[in-house]
Amino acid sequence: MSNPGEFLQACADGKIWLFCTKCNEVRNINDVEHLDCIGNESYWGPEPWWHDTRVFICKECGTQQTSAIEYVP
């Protein structure tokens, strides 16, 4: 999925997930409050969005978390 449009469509389709360590559960990227996106400075390939770390607030437990994203088809 090297096309950024495909990545955005996967987000819209609910196929991108984050992991909340407090809840020990996965959360859909659409179901959390997004605070920041931290780029992976050591990745220089064609798909940088897959290697970012997301900073978010889990709506279930209310804690701030960081997580890599996971694609679940």
Image (spheres, grey):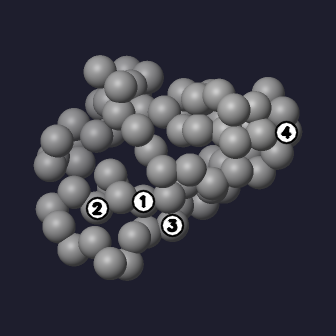
Seen as rendered, the residue at the extreme right is: 62
| SS class, disc 4 | loop
Depicted 27 relative to depicted 51: above or below: above
Q: Of helix, strand and loop, which one carries label 1?
A: loop
Mark 2, residue position: 48
Q: Kindly give the residue lying farthest to the bottom in the view shown.
A: 41
Q: Do we see residue 30 in this rendering?
A: no
The amino acid marked with disc number 4 is Gly
Q: Residue at x 42, y 32 (%)?
A: 16
Q: How would you rate the neighbour count of disc 3 (Cα within 10 Å): few for under 14, some for 14-19, many for 20 or more?
A: some
Q: Could you tell me residue 42's position as x and y percent?
A: 32, 78
Mark 2–mark 1 contact, CB under 8 Å? yes
Residue that mark 4 sits on: 62
Mark 4–mark 3 distance (CA, rounded to whole Å): 20 Å
Choose between 37 and 21: the one closer to the eye: 21
Which residue matches tag 1? Answer: 52
Q: Which residue is the site of mark 3? A: 38
